[in-house]
Amino acid sequence: MNLHAVQAIYRFEMARMARTLLQSIVSPVISTSLYFVVFGAAIGSRITEIGGVSYGAFIVPGLTMLMLLTQSVSNASFGIYFPRFSRTIYEILSAPVSYFEVVLGYVGAAATKSIILGLIILATASLFVPLEIAHPVWMLVFLLLTAVTFSLLGFIIGIWADNFEKLQLVPLLIITPLAFLGGSFYSVDMLPPFWQTVTLFNPVVYLISGFRWSFYDIADVSVGASLAMITVFLGLCLALVGWIFKTGYRLKA
Amino acid sequence: MNRKSSVALRRAERDLAHAQEASLLESVRLRPVISVSNLSKTYASGFHALKNINLEVRRGEIFALLGPNGAGKTTLISIICGIVNPGEGTVLADGHDIVTEYRAARFKIGLVPQELTTDAFETVWDTVSFSRRLFGRRANPGYIEKVLKDLSLWDKKDSKLITLSGGMKRRVLIAKALSHEPEILFLDEPTAGVDVDLRREMWQLVRALRASGVTIVLTTHYIEEAEEMADRVGVISEGELILVEDKAELMHKLGRKRLILQLKGPLERIPSALAAHTLELAADGHELVYTYDPQDERTDITALLGDLNEAGIRFKDLRTKQSSLEEIFVSLLRETRR
Ligand SMILES: Nc1ncnc2c1ncn2[C@@H]1O[C@H](COP(=O)(O)OP(=O)(O)O)[C@@H](O)[C@H]1O
Ligand SMILES: [Mg+2]
């Protein structure tokens, strides 16, 4: 295994993120704070608690997931899209690296960054509301699995996209709505029965539910279902990445 | 067995091992460093970019791949370097198959692409160090320093790539390609669109690299460049490798020139007194065209001019014309098809 290469790619990506620190850390933190002010304070004054948890605290896991999903996708997609766009990818393609090593470098860096970001957001949230974490290990497991899975999805989008619009559209048109409708700001059982059923087809529901369970021991769907869902999704992404590299899709003519 | 004979036996064994090792080394040295067999490539568009290419590059030489734009030069070296999927056929780099043993093959190769594709905000030092590690070598600041100094990039080591001129970017790409100490260096059109001074500099650099033991494959569409640099030349046109030859041979073949004489009065046909020269009439008899090979012993322009004078043929102007690459390719292609 060419560990030198994995490390080189990983460090390159982390350095790139460090250069754009403002936009990659500060802006998500600011927007999360805004959500707290708007949703936590304004709505929180009407809905006092859900399942025994104050509304402000209730939305923290969902909000963190929302940021985790969008940031994982956008980091990872940009990370691989940019060398394709600038054609510097020739070097990666001509290097003695396996596809697995390339993915490890790019996706590893993107996931690292979103995990750091997730922890920063949790820390920010703890300034607004009292946070308790019932299952810290599971909390980290959900954080890690979600960051890796959605970084993989971002990597796939970054390879598929052939222009900047597509690169930005997918997170905007798919990820954000799924996350909003996935129970970030409400409990699924607050919806009418029809919409409850529809919601169960949204994979993000399972992530948010599992993640929230690790905090407050309350869940919309069973924890097992949450874990199974994310594992299936991870498997799908891995299979897709494998196929991309095997065929050279959008990478090699 | 006594002690003396056992010492002799051991010595004989050692000599034998040395001899075997030497012959192994010799066979490695003689083995082509790049070997392309029956390579064809059809792009997804259906375009047939390479047609059954067979080529061997010798260790330590400068090999020039000469051909007009669109001939397939970049396609060929992109396949060897792993950037484009090979179609049919096999490629070995220092004996390693580029598909099944891609790690070993690519480790031996450095590539300087045709386009100046660099990052923007990285420094020279960082981008070259990155390349070395990407190719699986442990960091070695001393070596990177040497490469940058050899390429006169040392005082730019902390500059961001975006601030560099085109010529300097090209040298950064060369530094990146050399960073992992490859045995074979591919240079895709290193001097296309470069002014004369930079071109000369590049030629010197390539020679210095060869002297350091690196095998060099460069592509070009300039005959002069192939003439200046190469030990051997492969001519490629429309995806076909038309010929591979020693430079001296090829230059001889390509070296046809034409002397065009503009006549004061038109001629209807060439006077028999001039039959000894290879002459043709052009422009409705207003021009007399003499085709010759400047390297050929038999070429004698003085005699031709003397004969013209004696025949009373006057001319008001004259010019010579090197056969253009295009014409040469067409004629070569016609010859090989025949
Ligand atoms: N990805 C591609 N898809 C389809 N055709 C291509 C592709 N890349 C190159 N070609 C075509 O293949 C031919 C050879 O291109 P190339 O190898 O770049 O030539 P050269 O380097 O000799 O100028 C050209 O006609 C070019 O248009
Ligand atoms: Mg080319």
Image (spheres, grey):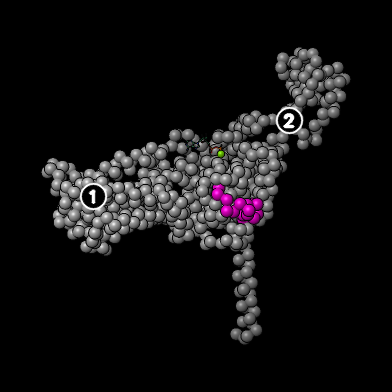
**Relative to B92, B252 lies left or right:** right
Residue at 81% in and 21% down: B274
Which x, y percent locates residue B102?
48, 53
Specify whether residue B184 is in view: no
Q: Give the numbered dot on residue B284.
A: none
Please state the horizontal and vertical placement of residue B315, each as a whole percent of the image: 81, 19
Q: Provide the residue designation for mark 2.
A: B257
Badge 2 crowding class, 10 Å Cα cut-off, few under 14, some 14 to 19, many 20 or more, is some
Circle 2: element type: strand
Quadrant in which residue B279 is drawn: top right
Number of marks drawn: 2
Q: Is residue A62 on the magenta stretch? A: no
Residue labelled with disc 1:
A40
Query: Could you say which quadrant of the image residue A163 lies in?
Result: top left
**Horizontally, is A110 left or right of B232 in the view?**
left
Q: Quadrant of the N terminus of chain B?
A: bottom right
Q: Tell me which amino acid carries mark 2.
A: Lys
Q: Is residue A18 visible?
A: yes
Number of residues whose C-alpha sits closer than 10 Å to that of mark 1, classed few (under 14), some (14–19) or many (20 or more): many
Provide the residue span drawn in magenta: B147-161
Give, as a three-letter code, the residue at label 1: Gly
The chain that hosts pointer 1 is A
Q: From what the image shows, is residue B36 above or below residue A1?
A: above
Q: Residue at x 87, y 20 (%)?
A: B310
Residue B311 against residue B320 in the figure, above or below: above
Tag nearer the camera, 2 or 1:
1
The location of residue A62, given as percent across then percent down, is 25, 51
Q: CA distance from mark 2 to mark 1?
A: 85 Å
